[in-house]
Image: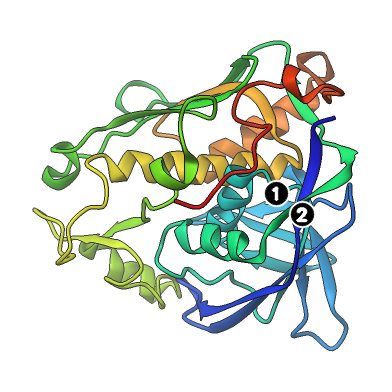
Amino acid sequence: MLQQRTLKSLTKAVGVGVHSGQRVELTLRPAQPDTGIVFRRVDLPEPVDIPVSALSVSDTRMATTVTASGTKVQTIEHFMSACSGLGIDNLYVDITAEEVPILDGSAASYVFLLQSAGITLQNAPKRFIRLLKTVEIRQGEGVQTKWARLEPHEGYKLGFEIEFDHPAVDSTGQRVEFDMATGNYSRDIARARTFGFTRDVEAMRANGLALGGGLDNAIVMDDYKVLNSDGLRYDDEFAKHKILDAMGDLYCLGKPLLAAYSAFRSGHALNNLLLRELLSRTDAYEVVSFEDERRAPAGFAQLARAW
């Protein structure tokens, strides 16, 4: 049986929210089978649990936010991406503020945290959502066109194409494909950082955003070049970060996908609309598990190792 996964032990992290600038502590705790990923706001007089699901996503402006009982946790996508890449099914995430810490701007620190705590198998079948029909969301026309699509595929692969009119971005790879069967999430995707432009920072901060952002947790560009002294971690880091984000957004479904995802200029909003469209079409998917893990698609049976 291909089994569900949780952590062996507690692990903790401290950081700041990229938008709020607030100090925040995370405590990651093991959870029982079929719990899913649950954020718990422990800073409130009465702790509030916020289970992650496609329908609990309440805001997708600049980040992915989940809400329950009027209480929210925002910027969950990098953490969710790490859980997706390592195949973590069940976890409690105690959090002391409303925003997940940005750490270094990628998912690498979360991969390290999860691996440090240890990943253990649970006596329950891992359940997948397998695509039976293509589902697509498309917005805009002409140069404003953007779209995201899920297609049937016995495995999990993602392709993303970006388009930015900026010299530093245009000089890098702008289309990336990642296949769980042949790639290594920790090595190939997890270290890609979020990115932004100095021309946008003033407006964002005036709106209470990017208050915790900087060169230590993002790729920052002026009108011509990357300002980080250490440059890029990957030749195609911008597009790879979009894959990282997409993996986090899609994992809000609550179960891993067996599908091929492809997108052009998509983002958090379109990714969530895609999941909602999928869930509304009960003929487009089925829930499956694998009694014989040797029959599971490549990339899912082995416990992922840190790089």
Residue that appears at 47% across and 68% down? 102
Residue neighbourhood size for the residue with mark 2, other residues' Cα within 10 Å, grouped as few (<14), some (14–19), many (≥20): many
Residue 6 in view of the camera: yes
Outermost residue, bottom side: 45
Question: From mark 1 to mark 2, how far is it between C-alphas?
Answer: 6 Å
Residue type, numbered disc 1: Ile
Lateral position of residue 225 relative to residue 38, left or right: left
Residue neighbourhood size for the residue with mark 1, other residues' Cα within 10 Å, grouped as few (<14), some (14–19), many (≥20): many
Badge count: 2
Picture coordinates of residue 295, whole percent (x, y): 74, 17
Q: Quadrant of residue 225?
A: bottom left
Numbered disc 2: secondary structure: strand
Picture coordinates of residue 240, whole percent (x, y): 37, 41
Residue 139 in view of the camera: no
Q: Are marks 1 and 2 in contact (CB under 8 Å)?
A: yes
Q: Is residue 294 above or below residue 207?
A: above
Picture coordinates of residue 252, whole percent (x, y): 69, 45
Residue type, numbered disc 2: Thr
Q: Nearer the viewer, residue 61 or 177?
A: 177
Q: Quadrant of residue 55?
A: top right
Lateral position of residue 148 relative to residue 207, left or right: right
Q: Which mark is residue 88?
A: 1
Lateral position of residue 200 relative to residue 166, left or right: right
Q: Is residue 98 above or below residue 87?
A: below
Residue that appears at 82% across and 32% down? 127
Image quarter (top left, top right, bottom left or bottom right) of the N terminus: top right
Residue that appears at 50% across and 74% down? 17
Q: Is residue 5 above or below residue 41?
A: above
> Which numbered disc, 1 or 2, marks the residue that appears first in the sequence?
2
Q: Which mark is residue 6?
A: 2
